[in-house]
Image: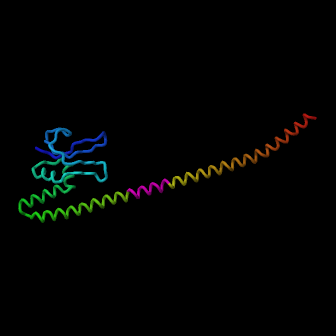
Amino acid sequence: MVRIRLARRGRKKKPLYDVVIADRKAPRDGRFIEKIGTYNPHTVPATIVLDDERALKWVLDGAQPTDTVKAMLSYRGVLIRKHLEIGVRKGAITEEQAAQKFEEWKAKKDAKITARIEKLSTEGEAAKKARLAAEAEVSAKRAEALKKKQEEAAKAAESENAEGGEAGDAEATAETNEAENTES
């Protein structure tokens, strides 16, 4: 039995996957018949590069997709094309009607994907602005606290100078008096 499944590659904790046609008994990352695409789950939304024509050919020939690959094929429209192709073979619809239905489905799907990407980018920008505003607020509070601390230090130094200046004057007069007494 032939399966359409994922073969893992990439580095540790950062997997990338190849979508392959392989015998059911072959190892996960081992021998395969044909590579029909790649899957990167780390991007938002996930990046799926797939040869739709080859995938459709294999599905129509009886290859069984795994659950993950089945979801990917559905996302890319391969399974709906299979459904429409079977309808054409049975004579339920014509080739033109099948093409029209698929194009309508594809337009809706593309609009949905574009809306999701735009939503994610606007949410990302809004989150970035919120982080920058919060950071600016924290910086302003820090600057204000630093300014208060500097003012308090200046006041303390000023009061020390005032107290030290009076004490220093008294000491200086006492020293001059002692110096005069010793000279005489």
Which x, y percent locates residue 173? 85, 42
Which x, y percent locates residue 46? 28, 51
Residue at screen point 18% across, 38% down: 30
- Where, by quadrant of the figure, is residue 82 drawn? bottom left
Q: Is residue 13 left or right of residue 141?
A: left
Residue found at the far left of this picture: 90
Q: Is residue 117 left or right of residue 32?
A: right
- Where, by quadrant of the figure, is residue 90 drawn? bottom left
Which x, y percent locates residue 117? 31, 58
Q: How many marks?
A: 0
Residue at screen point 33% across, 60% down: 118
Which x, y percent locates residue 86? 9, 58
In front: 181, or 118?
A: 118
Q: Is 132 part of what is drawn in magenta?
A: yes
Q: Using the image, determine if residue 174 lies above or below residue 116.
A: above
Placement of the C terminus among the 4 image quadrants:
top right
Residue at screen point 27% across, 59% down: 113
Residue at screen point 72% across, 46% down: 160
Q: Is residue 143 left or right of residue 91?
A: right
Residue found at the far top of this picture: 182
Q: Is 113 part of what is drawn in magenta?
A: no
Placement of the N terminus among the 4 image quadrants:
top left
Predominant SS of the magenta segment:
helix
Instruction: Give the colouring mode of the picture.
Output: rainbow
Which region of the structure is painted magenta? 124-135
Residue found at the far right of this picture: 184
